[in-house]
Amino acid sequence: RIDQEVKCRFEIAPDCVPGEHRFRLRTATQLSSLATFHVSPFVVVDEDEAHANANDTPATAQSVPLNVTVRGIAGNGSKGDVDVYRVPARPGQRLSVEVDCVRLADVHYGDSEFDLALRVLDSAGREIGANDESTLHLQDPLLSLKLPADVGEHVFVEVRRSIFAPVNVAYAVHIGSFERPLAAYPAGGAPGKKLAVKLLGDVLGEKQTDIAV
């Protein structure tokens, strides 16, 4: 029956590889369509929005540590929800911010409701980085920047809708000092062997490393 649903609760093994994982449900007569779940390499916390628009400005920003994944909701308020997170910072540090929203959605592309945008503001509220679309993840934005000398002791990470839509949309934002290369060269190699690759596009420069194919 198409009006039935199944809710799954996953127990993630400590050695589970981070990233997107695919699965199907098997019944006595058929397989379900393909679905996915995502595993973060970081501690996961929830957006703390006890009342409407609780963290919509730098003055009311939710404090989070570096190297964390925040599960948030882009709310359906008439003005459009803005979520702001306060993050510790130091001059010259790499700050990477990456949003999963379109990639978490379980519906086909609709009315741009999953299209989010990112900004990073210094402690004085000045914009030091912004991204709407990305070459790597298309509508899911990402930023990686080297914090300036006058950044202050913290920065603000702002997640907002790119286009207003009156629906609640779940997202995950990863905030940390992690590397965020945009490409690897060469792009492939022999399965089961180590491959020497050059990681390109990270804000602190190229890096040579070996990966398992």
Image (cartoon, grey):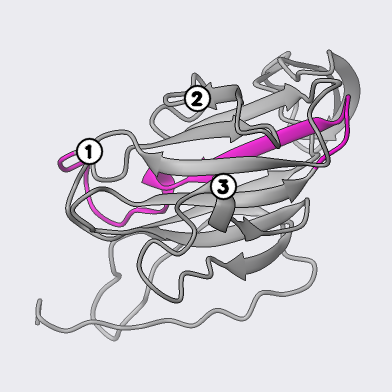
**Observer-nearest residue: 182 or 146?**
146
Q: Residues within 10 Å of mark 2 (few under 14, many from 20)?
A: some
Residue range of the region highlighted in magenta in the rendering: 89-111
Q: Which residue is mark 3?
A: 58
Confirm whether residue 162 shows in the render: yes
**Observer-nearest residue: 179 or 49?**
49
In three-dimensional space, the C-alpha distance between marks 3 and 2, rounded to whole angstroms, equals 18 Å
Which residue is rendered at x = 83% and y = 41% of the image?
153
Q: Is residue 34 magenta?
A: no
Q: Quadrant of residue 65?
A: bottom right
Q: Quadrant of the N terminus?
A: bottom left
Which residue is rendered at x = 76% and y = 18% of the image?
203
Q: Which residue is mark 2?
A: 131
In three-dimensional space, the C-alpha distance between marks 1 and 2, rounded to whole angstroms, equals 16 Å
In three-dimensional space, the C-alpha distance between marks 1 and 3, rounded to whole angstroms, equals 26 Å
Which residue is rendered at x = 88% and y = 35% of the image?
90
Q: Amino acid at mark 2?
A: Asn
Q: Quadrant of residue 133?
A: top left
Q: Secondary structure at mark 3?
A: helix
Q: Is residue 103 magenta?
A: yes
* Residue 125, x across and y down, in percent: 60, 33
Confirm whether residue 38 shows in the render: no
Circle nearer the N terminus (3, 2): 3
Q: Which residue is mark 1?
A: 112
Q: Residues within 10 Å of mark 1 (few under 14, many from 20)?
A: some
